[in-house]
Amino acid sequence: MRVSQGSCGNLGTADTFISSIGCNLIVEIEALTKIYESKLRVVAVDGVDLALKQGEIFGLLGPNGAGKTTTISIATTRALPTGGTVRIAGIDVVKHPAHARRLIGVVPQFNTLDRSLTVYENLYFHCRYFGFGHSPARARSLELLEQFLLSERRDTYPAQLSGGLGQRVQIARAIAHRPTVLFLDEPSAGLDPQSRMAMWTAVEALRTEGITVLLTTHYMEEADQLADRLAIIDYGRVLALGSPKMLKATLGAQAIFDVKLKSQDGVDAVLATLRRRDDVSSAEATADGMRVLSPNMAALLPALAEATAGLGMRDLKITEPSLETVFIQLTGRDLRE
C-alpha cells in the first residue's frame, strides 16, 4: 500500500485509525514490528498502525517497556524494524534514511546538548550542520532564543541550566532546521511540575508553525493536556486510539476502588453481591482484597464500605476517572507498572 502525501489513496489496514482525520498524512506507520532475538525472544513492537496528519500533537501513552521508545527509534532511523514500514512525508525511513532525517527533529529521553558549547552555539552549529550559511544560522538561532525565552541564557553552558531550561534548549535545537515532524521521547521525565508546565507551553506553541509532534509519555496528565489524539500502547500493541475525550467517553472511564482486606474469607460472596449492582462494571478479587470499577463513585463508596464491613477493610484507594482508569480497564494493570 502506498499513500502519497496530500492524498488519501487506498487507506487499507490503516483505515480504522485515520478515517476521521483527513488525508494530509505526514507520519504513516504500518504493520510495524520489532523483535529482538536472543536467549529470550522479545517482541518490542507488534504490528503497530498509526497515521498522523500535519500540525497535530499525537501521544503514545503506555508504561515503561510498552514499545513506545522502540517505535520512536525506528521512526527516527536509529533502529531498523523487523517488519512493516514508516514514512515521513512520503519518505520511507528505511530505504531513504538520510532524506528522512532532514524532515525530523528529535528530543531523546536524556540531555544530548553539547556541553562544550553555549546555548547559542548549540543552536548555531545545529543549523550549520543542516546546511545553513553563517548569516541564516545566526538569524535562526537568535529567533529561537527569543521564541523559547532563552535570550538571557545565550552564553550559558548546558551544565549551568536547570532540567526545564535544558529541555527547552533541546526542543529549540530540534526544530532549528524547520523539520516536518518533531519526536519527543518522554519529554518531561525528571522535570519538576513548574518546568513540566513550561515545556508543555513550548510544545503547544509549535502548532502555529504547522509542525507535527509525536511524543511518548507515561504521564496521563501530559497526554491529556497536550495530545489531540493518542494511542494507548502496551506490550508493543495499540490497544486504543482517539482523542483523550473520546477515549474516556467511549471506553467508559470509571472510578477504581482498590480495597485491601484483613480477611479473604467470604470475599466471593461480597463480589457476587457487588456485581449485581447496576453501578458496578467489574468486581474482581486481588491478592490482598478486591478491585471494583464503577461510573458512580459517590453512590458506590458507602455501599462498598457496608459490603466489606465483615471482612475488615484495611485500606481503600480510589482512582478517579482518567486516562489511567481507561488503561487499567484495557489491561488490568496500573499505567506505571
Image: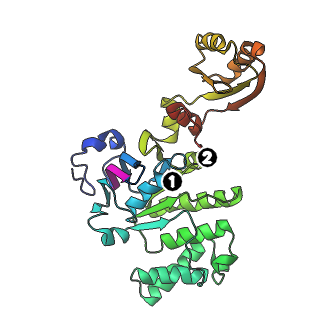
**Label ID, residue 221:** 2
| Residue 282, placed above or below residue 10 | above
Image-quadrant location for residue 159: bottom right
Task: Looking at this view, name the residue that lies furthest to the bottom.
Answer: 134
In the rendered image, residue 181, in percent from the top left (x then y), is placed at: 41, 62
Element assignment for label 1: strand
Tell whether position 29 is magenta: yes
Q: Quadrant of residue 101?
A: bottom left
Left or right side of 221 for 265 = right
Q: In x, y percent, where is residue 249?
A: 51, 31
Inspect the image, locate mark 2, and give the three-letter code of the amino acid beneath it. Answer: Glu
The residue located at (66%, 79%) in the rendering is 153
Which amino acid is tagged 1? Thr
- Which residue in the structure is indicated by mark 1? 216
Region of the chain picked out in magenta, as a range: 26-35
The residue nearer to you, when weighing 95 against 202, is: 95
Q: Nearer the viewer, mark 2 or mark 1?
A: 1
